[in-house]
Image (cartoon, rainbow, N blue to C red):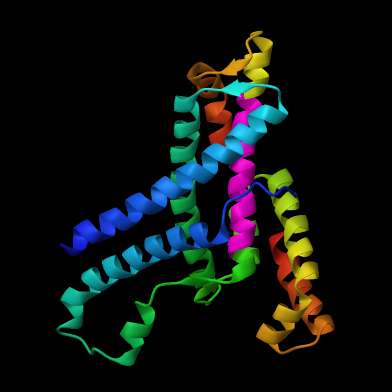
Amino acid sequence: MEREEEDSVSELLRDRFRVSTISIAEAEAKRNDMEISGPVMTCIADLAFKFTEQLAKDLELFAQHAGRKTANMEDVILSAHRNEHLAALLRSFSNDLKAREPQSERKRKKSSKKEDQATTSVVHIPDS
Amino acid sequence: MEENTFEPDLVHAIFKLVWSNRALERQMIEGTDALDCEVGAGTSKKNRPSSANGNAVKLSCELLRNFVTEAVQRAATIAEAEGVSKIEATHLERVLPQLLLDF
């Protein structure tokens, strides 16, 4: 009974994820002046879903290794460390996110922005 | 960058599902020992599922969006080289190994 419920939840998530992937893939194909066939999009959606599950496991392990219970942006960047371009892209996106929401960050960490930057740069040095 | 991306709530829900499943698994494995050993606050803390902060989830959405757009773009390049205007499964097949290595 419980197992069935769990399965239906994961099926629902998978379907919602598939819909999102298809809209992204279609938009991207349109930008390239291309059509894209349905099975290809479904396949990409399933790949992306598997990738998400793997990412969740990675983030959990990275956070645990750092002695945390909560995955943060450094963990996400670390998960892409094999691809320098991707890691650089994510790092710049993470800086954008930080810059866009300074108030929530201050609320969470209860520290000044200078201290915040200092801690992130300390974290930054060993993994680059 | 664009308005077309994954919803952070959706990605977070998937993460939570994976983490709670893994926490359950850990509990099952430890459950057999826990009967003999101490069942203290330490074990329940250890078995609590992980969580993620909001920005980490948004960043994961960006990573996933990049995965999808890269897959389409690379397949589109192959389709273009073949002179067709529709991306088919064979085009994805050609780019898949490198794509999976890059992510």
x and y, in percent, of residue B65 in the image: 62, 45
x and y, in percent, of residue A49 in the image: 45, 46
Q: Which residue is drawn at 75% across and 88% down?
A: A111
- Residue A40: say if magenta: no
Relative horizontal placement of residue A14, taking residue B5 as reference (left or right): left
Instruction: State the residue lying farthest toward the top.
Output: B83
- Residue B73: say if magenta: yes
Q: Which residue is drawn at 54% across and 36% down?
A: B100
Instruction: State the residue lying farthest toward the right.
Output: A114
Q: Note whether B39 is above or below B2 in the view shown.
A: below
Relative horizontal placement of residue B43, taking residue B71 as reference (left or right): left
Relative horizontal placement of residue A10, taking residue B51 as reference (left or right): left
x and y, in percent, of residue A95 in the image: 78, 63
Q: Note whether B33 is above or below A86 in the view shown.
A: below
Q: Nearer the viewer, residue A66 or A45?
A: A45
Relative horizontal placement of residue B21, taking residue B11 as reference (left or right): left
Q: What stretch is highlighted in magenta?
A: B57-75
Q: Residue at x 56, y 56 (%)?
A: B7
Quadrant the C terminus of chain B occupies: top right
Q: Is residue B102 visible to the viewer in this orientation of the structure?
A: no
Q: Is residue B37 visible to the viewer in this orientation of the structure?
A: yes
